Image: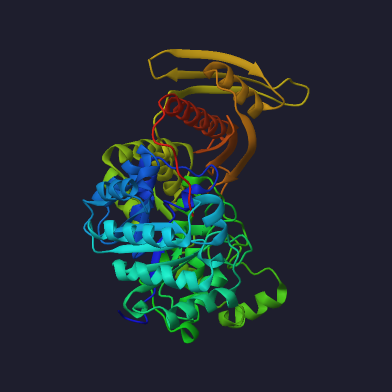
Amino acid sequence: MNDQKLIIFDTTLRDGEQSPGASMNLAEKLEIAFALRDLGVDVIEAGFPIASPGDFEAVQAVARQVEGTTICGLARCNSADIDRAWQALCDAPKPRIHVFLATSAIHREFKLHMAKDEIVRRAIEGVLRAKSYCEDVEFSPEDAARTELDFLAEVVEKAIAAGATTINIPDTVGYAVPAQYSAAIRYLKENVPGIDKVVLSVHCHNDLGLAVSNSLAALMDGARQVECTINGIGERAGNCALEEIVMAVRTRQDYFHLITPIQTRRLYHTSRLVSRITGIQVQRNKAIVGQNAFAHEAGIHQDGMLKDRSTYEIMRPEDVGFQRTELVLGKHSGRHALRQRIADLGFHLTDEQLLHVFDGFKALADRKKEVYDADIEALAETAIHTGPAVWTLEAVTCNAGSGTVPSAAVVLWHKDGTLCRDANVGDGPVDAVFKTIERITGVDVVLREFQVRSVTIGEDAQGEAQIEAEHNGRIIRGRAVSTDIIEAAALAFLQVINRALLREQLRMNPQTEEVIVS
């Protein structure tokens, strides 16, 4: 193995999806998987196949359709999980089974109710069964950062002897600090026979804000794979952020002496894609991909930048994919030109999705003078987001103003072909629209957050509406774009309603119980 090569293992589709409200449909998962492949990640952890039929279907689809990278599925150290993982992965050109078992004292006592010798035996059996299916097997001692070092070394040694090719050391609850975490990596390197023959990996959570720091510290003591997610998404405070690891290693190549295959100019696009699909916004001051990452407001900074960019800029915006908004297409542009531009922007659309985008593009070109890259991206992302719809919007009108009671009238199509009309009043035009939709559909949700922003520039820019709502204790997100922000709000809210109805259908037909791990 090239000791300078840093393997990037992306778990956006598995650990990242465990962010509250961040569940994705199959088309969205495939779009992210293609984007990760194009970004250049070495390993895509596509999901946890036994967790649910939807997870199995997603891992299987990614394994069959996404080539050029290793596709990984997660499994606990038991036969049913591992067999199910292989069923999902067997068509992948480069499959990996990732097995895990908790090892810390607190997990042994309160979660597993197992003694140390039973943990070791289960770990060996899990690795051996995974190895019987494929050569590439990763083993993770869950909560390794809180595991006694001597016992951790014992489990790792036995997993290597059983055939594991990658050993991952998870800081499952974000408990570690850099010096402690890197010392654990160093201890394993020095005390586990055969560890020089496998890849040593790290998987850090961000509960104390140290996921990236811990991962970078581990690299200095011999770790050569980092498990991370786009935008650092994940349950609780999230995971190690892929873009921060990659640009730290690239920008400080003089310090880390490591290389990655990541096409960094695709980082910003991939970040935006994941943000829009999951509904989880990137904070403005987020490192690398935040809106303010390359903004300089202080006068002394602006003066320095004008004289030499390196005075206050250690990376160039274009290195991570920030680009000036480009005017790309006009109302007379054809489908072929649109298809090519969508491909250039990194989207992988079906013919049906492309037709949906083309229709939206023609309508948009009639409504606004200039169509920009960001407009095309918004249309493409809307096509990807479109899932099973019980209700679709036919028309919406509203009345509001000083001294007027806000009201709205909405016309919806039901999937059975029924056209439904109703009207209602509210505290404002958007509230009136939402209440009308709830009354027509019979679905009540609790609105938690509502945001509207401009997609591009100009008074005729598309408005993007983002909604976060709660239904039966679960967070659901919706987004939509339109040059009419009331229409965008109605479409986003209807997306929430449709997703709530889909979840109700799944609840009425219960399948395998979902399993959450990190």
Image x and y of residue 356, in percent: 35, 36
Viewer can see residue 200? yes
Q: How is the image coloured?
A: rainbow
Q: Number of marks in the image?
A: 0
Q: The N terminus appears in which quarter of the rendering?
A: bottom left
The residue closer to the viewer here, 318 or 121, is 121
User: In the figure, 467 relative to 338: above or below?
Assistant: above
Left or right: where does residue 399 sit relative to residue 442?
right
The residue closer to the viewer here, 7 or 430, is 7
Image x and y of residue 293, in percent: 58, 66
Left or right: where does residue 337 sit relative to residue 307?
left
Residue situated furthest right in the rendering: 403
> Residue at coordinates 37% horizontally, 81% vertically from top-left?
4
Image x and y of residue 460, in percent: 54, 42
Q: Quadrant of residue 206 in the image?
A: bottom right
> Residue at coordinates 35% horizontally, 53% vertically from top-left?
33
Left or right: where does residue 450 sit relative to residue 376?
right
> Residue at coordinates 38% horizontally, 15% vertically from top-left?
417
Image x and y of residue 274, in percent: 46, 51
The residue closer to the viewer here, 349 or 177, is 177
Left or right: where does residue 482 sit relative to residue 199?
right
User: In the figure, 127 relative to 386: above or below?
Assistant: below
Viewer can see residue 325? no
